[in-house]
Amino acid sequence: MHLIVPYDAAGSRPCFSPSLLMNTAGVTMSSAVWLFAYSPCQIGFSGLGTINGQIYGGSDVNTSLGFTLQYQSVPTYGIANAASAPTGYTTGIVYKRETR
């Protein structure tokens, strides 16, 4: 599972918005689910037990008591294997939802 806030979404650094905050009380993540979380700003996890993956934050990374991160190398898309050159990929906004 990839949770990514684009680098250019933040105006200046260090920043606190846009942030990536997860409050997952009562949610259990299987060890088969690997998480890659990135934000140029703040990242926060609360109410979550153990997850496997990586977290990269450009500002504060906050976790609650009982949170455990087990390092897991998460695949990077666009790279066939470590010996080959990156082929790259392009992402774009497919749908934008605004709420009040």
Image: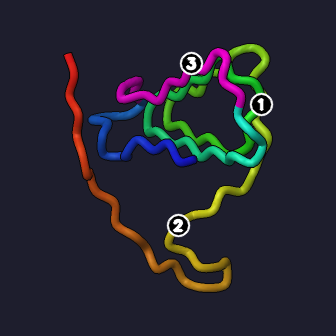
Depicted 54 relative to depicted 99: above or below:
below
Mark 3 or 2 closer to N-term?
A: 3
Mark pair 3, 2: CA separation = 27 Å
Residue at 38% from the left image edge and 34% from the top image edge: 13
Q: Position of residue 10 (x, y in %)?
A: 32, 36
- Callout 2: SS: loop
Range shown magenta: 15-28
Q: In the image, what residue type sits under mark 2?
A: Tyr
Residue bearing mark 1: 50
Residue bearing mark 3: 23
| Front residue (pair 83, 12) | 83
Residue at 37% from the left image edge and 46% from the top image edge: 7
Q: Residues within 10 Å of mark 2 (few under 14, many from 20)?
A: few
Mark 3 or 1 closer to N-term?
A: 3
Mark pair 3, 1: CA separation = 13 Å
Q: Position of residue 77 (x, y in %)?
A: 52, 67
Quadrant of the rendered image containing residue 44: top right
| Front residue (pair 34, 9) | 34
Q: In the image, what residue type sits under mark 3?
A: Asn
Depicted 5 relative to depicted 60: above or below:
below
Q: Position of residue 40 (x, y in %)?
A: 44, 39
| Front residue (pair 11, 99) | 99
- Callout 3: SS: strand
